[in-house]
Amino acid sequence: MNITINGNTCWAKPGETILDAARREGIKIPTLCHLSEFSPTGSCRICTVEVESNGSLVPACAFPVTEGMAIRTNSPRVRRARKTIIELLVANHPQDCLFCVRSGNCELQSLTQEYGVRTQRWTGERKRARIDIASPAIERDPEKCILCGRCVRICHEQQHVGAIDFVHRGFKSTVAPALERSLNTVPCVDCGQCVVNCPVGALTEKSHQKVVWEAINHEEKYVVAQVAPAVRVALGEEFGAEPGTVVTGKTVAALRRLGFKRVFDTNFSADLTIIEEATELLSRLNNGGPTPMLTSCSPGWVKFIEHYYPDLLGNLSTCKSPHEMQGALLKSYYAQKIGVDPSRIFVVSIMPCTAKKYEAQRPELGNEYPDVDAVLTTRELARMIHSAGIDFHRLPNEGFDDPMGESTGAGAIFGAAGGVMEAALRTAHFYLTGEDMKSLTFAPIRGLEGVKQADVKVGNVTLKVAAISGLANIKPILDDMRAGTSPFHFIEVMACPHGCINGGGQPQPASPEKIIKRTESIYQIDRESPRRNSHRNESIQKLYAEFLGEPNGHKAHELLHTHYVERDEF
Amino acid sequence: MQTQENTQHIYAKYPKGQASCLIDMLQEVQEHFGYLPDIEMQKVARHVEIPVSRVYGVATFYNQFRFQPLGKFVVKVCRGTACHVKGSLDILRTLENELGIKAGQTTKDLGFTIETVACIGACSIAPVIAVNEEFHGGLTTKSLVKLLSMYKKKANTAEVEHELV
Amino acid sequence: MNSYSRDCFENCWHSAERPCPHFVSCVNNGQQCECGDAVTARLEQYKRHLLMVEHDLPVILVGMGTCGLANGARRIHDAIIAELNTRGIAASVIPVGCVGYCAREVIVDIKLPGKPRISYCEVKEKDVVALIESTIMAGEVLTDKLLGLYERPQDSPWAALPLVNENPFFAKQQKINLENCGVIDPESIDQYLARGGYTALSTVINGKSGQDVINDMLTAGVRGRGGGGFPTGRKWQFARDQQSDKKYLICNADEGDPGAFMDRALLEGDPHRVVEGMIIAAYAIGASYGYIYCRAEYPLAIARLEKTLADAREYGLLGNNILGSGFNFDMRIKKGAGAFVCGEETALIHSIEGRRGMPRPRPPYPAVSGLFGKPTVINNVETFANVTTVFKNGAEWYGSIGTQTSKGTKIFALSGKVTNVGLVEVPMGTTLREIVFDIGGGIPDGKQFKAVQIGGPSGGALPVQVIDTPIDYESLKAVGAMMGSGGLVVMDETTCMVDLAKYFMTFIQSESCGKCIPCREGTKRLLEILERLSKSHRNETTQEESLLRFQGMVYLERLASVIKDTSLCGLGQTAANPVLSTLQYFKEEYEAHLYDRCCPAGACRELLTFHIDTEKCNGCGLCAKKCPEAAIIGEKKKAHYILEDKCIRCDQCRVNCNFDAIYVN
């Protein structure tokens, strides 16, 4: 059908919204509450446009186009309405942009600039609330919240957690955890999806920047960093690079310049995880279960199953997540190697994730010392680079330190949903058949769907596998498992949709285009790797020979495996 | 304080996992306790299989639900238009002053709760208040003070049974 | 035990499980089947009994709607029974709904065998003995409590007594939808049937297709009585045209407008009429299940509805195979939990689904995708009562009442500063003046009429200049108000229009769901602008505060228009109406607040100055004692004075002065 936008006739699909049609035409309509792939709520009204035929203002995000419709997206009436709405938001906002972590990257702030808000037109009572800082991963400042509801919908509909919701009504409305408790006393899984989708500074990660700076400047500390696979394809965005730009070498260089003594690659321990996990899978298959085995590298997912399906904890792989394995080895194997007392080693994980912050402080992860001392999100690392005055683009490409710097393509693809599964299958295939897979690209579990499943023939065994991302998608499968009807042998679960590349610690705001680009880059790293099978990682082979012994052996269990706790649902 | 088994009959009435029963269940729980205790909201959440945050979100949306126990006497002040033009705001202010609490609150001794309602529907005798379902109309600030002292005496002496809505 | 089930069911083949298509016509027009003359005679006799044409015992009917109860009807009811018992008099005492004359509650009607029905008003507990002694025992009319007779007797000394319908309050009314309210026992399905109840349903179900019903609705021209005035037939057509395995029907009985109680009166006084209308609507659109979403604040209405539904099911009028037609429809009551915004269709649907009652954008309209995603029609209580009327009296007849665009009658809840507070039903096109002055009896206490607020929080306040506006959807819109659900609040010279606007903004603001920004944030700012107007300069501590007062008025219209243009639902879109209409008609009052810092009506307390009339003051000192700020000084036995800058305008001195010596200006 044909419609007219701002006097230009264009084509539109029946049933689509004005917003979709306008975006395709390259016409920007501002939005706050809009979330692509979710049904519109029409709550912010900032996407107001004028329908010329009846002179009414309608929300572009929710209003379907009709044949011959004439729309104006920038008439004086529309601009005045939008500006007034922005002014109303500002009137009920702390306006402390100078102190806000989102300053410069805040959707409300950009709107005030775009619409030329220069005065405080409305003055009056402002919402008052306390900041909730008790959670180890996420901080909430309800005063900054503009009630767009993105976090609530993400938490309920995409993650099926429902840790937060709207409470109260009208001017007193706010977004809060159940019974208005603190986030750390409700079953929040710390995935941080709310944080990446928050348009303002109401939801942020718990910052570890200060402790990291202190450790770096501490004479006694031996501060080392490790970088997760998904960070290197996203960090560049924080410095204006195109989404998906691979900045591995510059990241390493930047970390060195920040003062880290050594910079390691979490991809190394991703390879290690594969060895351990594939071995565990085979032993479960041989010893009758329990299957399906569920992966355990996503701490948000681990917390989810502990809260909501504690009866299925036996199915969860006992492997620690890669950065915890790395931390454990850094404080044992590596400490021994360089002759530094483990108490002096301070491990900082650079992660695309907020749940890793929570994971790092789990008491069972570490012996005398925690395996990992601090976790920085991609965003925090960018802030540290900025504040250290490092010109990111002019950095040389540097390599990771040995011996925990070597990695294969299999470790790299941990960053994308389905990657762990694919990497594990490559190694499982080798263990079962003694040879590497012919084609290493595994189409059925690549792609952007939340649920991907496949039957994989490994030797004479057919494995039924699935890769799930986004916690809402796992629920039916867990229910099947409870009922004992699940056909699967092995299931990869990532708390965040599309995996770590879209993690809660990645650059804000999240968008589908960024996800596609970052995913492509992850697979590109794999393609271009000289070795693409975890079992081919020579440093790992050496590690087993020198230190760990057998995969799943005694020492490996002590350092690389963990146990879980049942948590209350409330 | 009522014990757990007392509310079992409420839960038994509703099928599990039916979110559309949520408000009905909360209403019954409140009828039972006079307010919504935290623990009951959690039980309701488990019963209808939705997150507690959602139950709490729904409960705080509606005027009817309370989260603290009520006073012996619940004084509902009608704030309908007819009552307003006949001075119900003065009635409310006087009441608040006399009891030392604001609308929506309960006195420390659990004697009185003040609530405002949009319209009791007794516009003919405006301004009107209802004390535990008993209507008092045609009030002035003077007559209110008298009325209140009567209830204050009652609150201090006998135990009062009142029906909760 | 219901008696139609005894007289008809027990003698015939049909039962609740096997309903008979002729049931309604049998009880109304005499028996249609082969059950024999004895049954016909019994049915006929029972009907005469129900209509109180033939009865042995005196019947006492006590008006026990909520307003009656608020005036002590329960105590009177109990006193009557006690008195009858002590005197050993046999009589039946029946609680009825509200006849609508709230100003004269409690209303007690007495029907003696063979005499016209007598209606007494303003009955107090102490009058019960006199009532029983004079009317029941002596057979005489107690004239000083008499409201009127229901019909004029040909003979007897009663011929000179007034009729109820001659009372000016009733004379200009046309009671169609309210015909049974206060007249019949609302809990008796038999009485409803005897007065032609369910004939509308019977005609529809035994001879019309769903499309016929919709066509008739369009012919009659019924428009939604909930406020918007959308043609009901068209709404039904949308839902009928949807293909779906399930469709729902919802009756919106979440009457939340302050000052409106029409729906409550209907539900309490004649619940079967509403239920009948719902069944007809369900038949027309093909709905299989319905909900009545009723405010929890209406416990009496809910209790009566429960009984109504149970009785209708027992008679085969509700449930499976209604009147043997094969049409299935049942419904239940959902209690609202107190949120004004749930009067909005999509919010109401969310509330029934057990969610926060927040509206969602339309389209899709509920008729396409509503409750649980199924096609759903939502109409309000009064609309359903009108549906019954259309099919009871005929679409053509209905269409002949009212104006060109607005058909039928409208029920209003008349309250505020008016003599005859109550429920009135008038044909569309009646002027506001007729309602306020003829029916309402004008303004009490010799005060001047100032405005009438129509349409509740979404409507507007109309001044004397436009009081001759006929009541119909378009005319009201033209003068800046709207039909709304039917609250009419009359205001006299002592009502301040700024205060009124502030009152409605406070209401809207506290009832805003908080979903969309213009309504959540905008109404708050609008309210703050109004609050600054009525704030005393003594409480303005800085110059900025005074500036804000002016700034607010400058930007008021901008804010109001954005709220109107961009809000998500009707509540927000009309939120600014009370402000805009008062600003339109009472601009000078706003200006007096803004510039002169005074309130001409004397309602905005902070802007008043309290004075002591030295002539009247005898120096008793009571005011000084009551003054919380020690702002009153004076020697004993001599006139006192108020220190203006200490006075906090608490009004305690004026309330407590026994000599009316304190005045304000």
Image: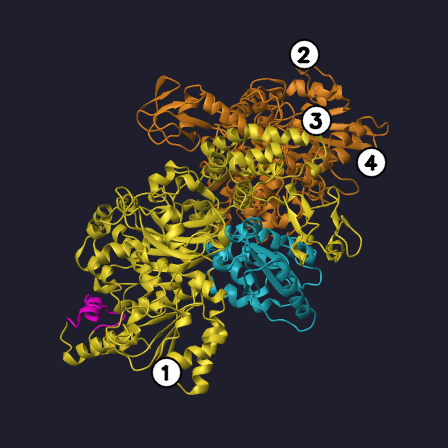
Chain colours: A orange, B cyan, C yellow
**Is C535 on the left-hand or right-hand side of C148?**
right
Q: Report crowding for label 1: few under 14, some 14 to 19, many 20 or more residues within 10 A (C-alpha).
A: few
Q: Position of residue C611 (x, y in %)?
A: 68, 46
Q: Position of residue A330 (x, y in %)?
A: 75, 33
Residue where numbered disc 3 is placed: A264
Q: Secondary structure at mark 4?
A: helix
User: Does residue B103 appear anywhere in the picture?
Assistant: no
Q: Which of the two residues, B125 or A464, is positioned nearer the viewer here?
A: B125
Q: Secondary structure at mark 3?
A: strand
Chain of the residue displaying label 2: A
User: Does residue A14 appear anywhere in the picture?
Assistant: yes
Residue C330 location, quadrant: bottom left
**Is A200 on the left-hand or right-hand side of C21?**
right
Q: Nearer the viewer, mark 4 or mark 1?
A: 1
**Contact (Cβ within 8 Å) of mark 4 with mark 2:** no
Residue B159 location, quadrant: bottom right
Q: Report crowding for label 3: few under 14, some 14 to 19, many 20 or more residues within 10 A (C-alpha).
A: many
Q: Nearer the viewer, mark 2 or mark 1?
A: 1
Q: Magenta part mainly helix, strand or loop?
A: loop
Residue where numbered disc 2 is placed: A394
Residue where numbered disc 1 is placed: C138
**Is B135 on the left-hand or right-hand side of C328?**
right
Amino acid beneath label 4: Ser
Chain of the residue displaying label 3: A
